[in-house]
Amino acid sequence: MSDKATLEINGEKYEFPILVGSEKEVAIDIKSLRSATGGVITLDPGYKNTGSCESAITFLDGENGVLRYRGYSIEELAEKADFLEVAYLLIFGELPTKEQLDKFDKDIKSHSVVDDDIKKILDAFPKSAHPMGVLSSLTSALTAFYPTSVDVTSEEQMYNSIVRILAKFPVLVAWTLRKKHGLPLDYGDNKLSYVENILKMMFKSPSSDYEQNPILVNALDKLLILHADHEQNCSTSTVRIAGSSHAGLFVSLASGISALWGPLHGGANQAVLEMLEAIKADGGDTKKYMAKAKDKNDPFRLMGFGHRVYKNFDPRAKIIKAAADEVLNDLGIDDPILDIAKGLAKEALEDPYFIDRKLYPNVDFYSGIIYRAMGIPVEMFTVMFALGRLPGWIAQWREMRLRNEPIGRPRQLYIGETLREFKTIEKR
Ligand code: CMC
């Protein structure tokens, strides 16, 4: 392949370097386009064809359903690693040695107390507040309690902020849930593993001990690993672009949490369950909802289907489907919602509309079913996604800082009015 791409505009030829990634992905480097051509830009709404950065964290091949963190396949990581090891891998680039993992764990645990004043902020939210909004606000508020986190030039401060947020985020998540359910706020137990601690903090009743269920611990560990990074998706790009202004880690993460909230992104897991419930309440007629999804005059979409990059299958969905079956079998749960989900998936996978558009069940089609079996309320599903995505956001933010990337500032093609004269109010 040539190492240059040629662009011709009005008879003038311009050459741009062709870059090849470590997995032979090809990109035209258009950094000099605007200056070379005297103002021409590219237009790519939704960034479907635009690489925003070079990154060494996650490799994703949507055509072949491949997902790797730092070169390790998601299948192998989900089977052999735990979430904290994966977090270390994503953030620092290598699987940790025993000593490195112990230190990381110890550093995180040393920050597991959240300032009591954060409870006052939490208290100011009504019970009706969506947990994603609460979590985004509390994450942002941490900056006020740890002002050194705004120093993004010091690697030491960056490390402190990283272990701080990894320690405090699960506490904030648990508090958000407990506040909603009117339960007293509490801390975890540093003797437990990261994932065991999350479950205990969320579910411990004030009047009894919390008994860990290894099936749930294992399932949650897997779910968090599968959600841990997904290269330049909407929320991650938001974290990177917010951080590119040299904003601190906590506020950059708060922006990412807000971006994740929407139903086309992380909010899809909640939307899937709500959709399945609605189908059940409407008599369980999956064919009716398939027809709605295909009707161009109906805004209804089959939630949990389709993906911007996976156009063959979502490898995370495969692993999660198996985990969902395992959890439901082990817990002896017979859930009619699961039958509706299976029916929809079968119909969609055989339907030309879905086949032609390469629409397959995505990770969120099955994750909600497991969360529900675990007793996690629907409005917390996207929060669980955020909990998993946290190391990915951190890794991407840190990479962006260490590479000293320029501030993110896209251009636009202006299609508004040209210069016109101001009209006084009487003449309008
Ligand atoms: N149900 C029905 N039709 C669909 C669906 C769906 N879920 N998804 C896409 N389509 C159709 C769409 O109408 C369009 O049809 P046509 O070409 O006739 O106009 C075609 O498929 C392409 O859709 P698109 O919206 O241009 O594709 P996209 O890459 O911009 O959108 C998506 C990807 C995930 C936003 C979209 O598939 C969707 O809205 N899915 C449902 C929401 C969902 O499950 N999101 C979770 C994604 S996985 C978690 C994460 O990583 O965030």
Image (cartoon, grey):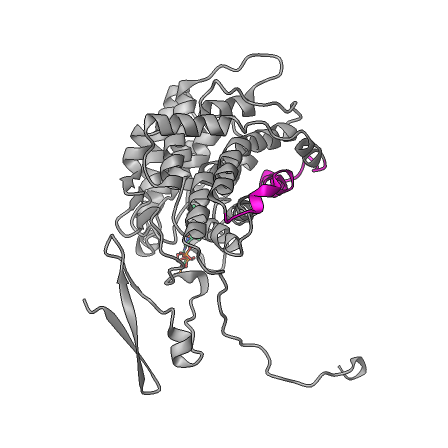
- Figure check: 425 above or below 189: below
Q: Which residue is outermost to the top?
A: 208
Q: Which residue is at a point 36% across and 69% down the rendered structure image?
A: 30
Residue in view at x 42 percent, y 67 percent? 44
Residue sticking out furthest to the left: 1
271 to the left or right of 205: left
Q: Residue furthest bottom?
A: 11
Q: Is residue 216 above or below residue 304?
A: above
Q: Position of residue 151 (x, y in %)?
A: 55, 47
Q: Main secondary structure of the magenta part?
A: helix
Q: Is residue 283 visible?
A: no
**Residue at 47% from the left image edge and 31% from the top image edge:** 371
The stretch drawn in magenta includes residue 272: no
- Kindly indicate the quadrant of the structure image that contains residue 369: top left
Q: Is residue 146 magenta?
A: yes
Residue 347, given in percent of the width and then of the height, sits at: 35, 44
Q: The N terminus lies in which quarter of the figure? A: bottom left
The residue segment tinted magenta is 124-153
In this rendering, the answer to whether 363 lies above or below 83 is below
Query: Which is nearer the eye, 224 or 377?
Result: 224
**Left or right of residue 175, residue 363 in this image:** left
Give how far across and how far down residue 365 sits, in percent: 41, 40
Quadrant into which the C terminus falls = bottom right
Q: Answer whether residue 265 is visible to the viewer in this image.
A: yes
> Residue 418 sits in which quadrant?
bottom right
Q: In the depicted view, which residue is nearer to us: 50 or 290?
A: 50
